[in-house]
Image (spheres, rainbow, N blue to C red):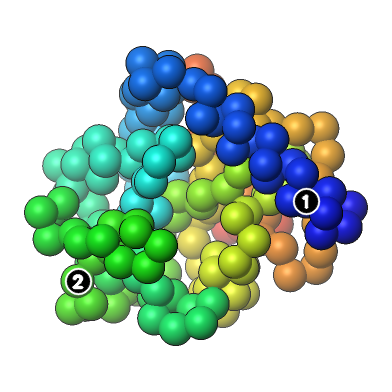
Amino acid sequence: MDGKEKDAVRKLMKERRNALSAREREEAAKSIERELLCMKEFADCELFFTYLSCGAEISTKDIVLAALRAGKTVAAPKVTGSGQMEFYQVETLLSLSAGAFGILEPKPDRVLTPDMGKTFLLLPGLAFTRSGERLGYGGGYYDRYLSVHKEAFLAAPAYPFSVLESLPVQAHDVMAHALILPGGVVYTGAGAYLAL
């Protein structure tokens, strides 16, 4: 699949997301939150890394609050340069402000990395396969970051329609260890991840 085909899949996934009603999005996010909170990998983690949702993405607001209530150290990404990001600690949602691309970002106070403790990372994406392949937004931020920081358990929240039969993968593309769907978790068997 070339760049044009990838762009066509991205466009279709965005259209399907945008076609969802606010209620459908909210119900999907609530179901995914319930599934996530029941995962052993979440229960066992010390650090919880999450994207901060924007637009029609699966909302992470209540997931962040639940992780904080569960006593997890929470971190979210902040763009630090061209194609580069770091994860900074989030102690409260009130500390977030709009950053690159209008997405909420944490204050750059305390950098956290997955090697600091057992880390559960929520992996954003537009499309996935049940074997863990992922089509992101095209910026390569997560692929670059996770090529260096390989210690995290990677779980991708996903709408059912975004799970496809196949996607193109390249050697550097990050694979999800699990997909969190409304109503169930799919363990992909991707990558050699040591269970927490």
Q: Are marks 1 and 2 in contact (CB under 8 Å)?
A: no
Residue 1, above or below 115 = above
Q: Residue 50, can we see it?
A: no
**Residue at x 19%, y 41% (from the top left corner):** 65
Q: Residues within 10 Å of mark 2 (few under 14, many from 20)?
A: some
Percent of width and height locating residue 154: 53, 52
Q: Residue 147, can we see it?
A: yes
Percent of width and height locating residue 43: 33, 42
Percent of width and height locating residue 20: 49, 21
**Residue at x 77%, y 44% (from the top left corner):** 8
Of marks 1 and 2, which one's residue comes earlier in the chain? 1
Residue 161, above or below 191 = above
| 40 vs 145, nearest the viewer | 145
Q: Residues within 10 Å of mark 1 (few under 14, many from 20)?
A: some
Residue 162, above or below 153 = above
- Which residue corresponds to mark 1? 6
Q: Which mark is residue 108?
A: none
Percent of width and height locating residue 26: 35, 22
Q: CA distance from mark 1 to mark 2?
A: 33 Å
**Residue at x 35%, y 57% (from the top left corner):** 103
Query: Quadrant location of residue 22?
Result: top left
Q: Amino acid at mark 2?
A: Lys
**Residue at x 54%, y 77% (from the top left corner):** 83
Q: Which mark is residue 107?
A: 2
Instruction: Assign a secondary structure to mark 1.
Output: helix
Can you name the residue that lies furthest to the bottom here? 81
Query: Quadrant location of residue 46?
Result: bottom left
Instruction: Assign a secondary structure to mark 2.
Output: loop
Which dot, 1 or 2, sits closer to the camera? 1
Q: State the count of labels.
A: 2
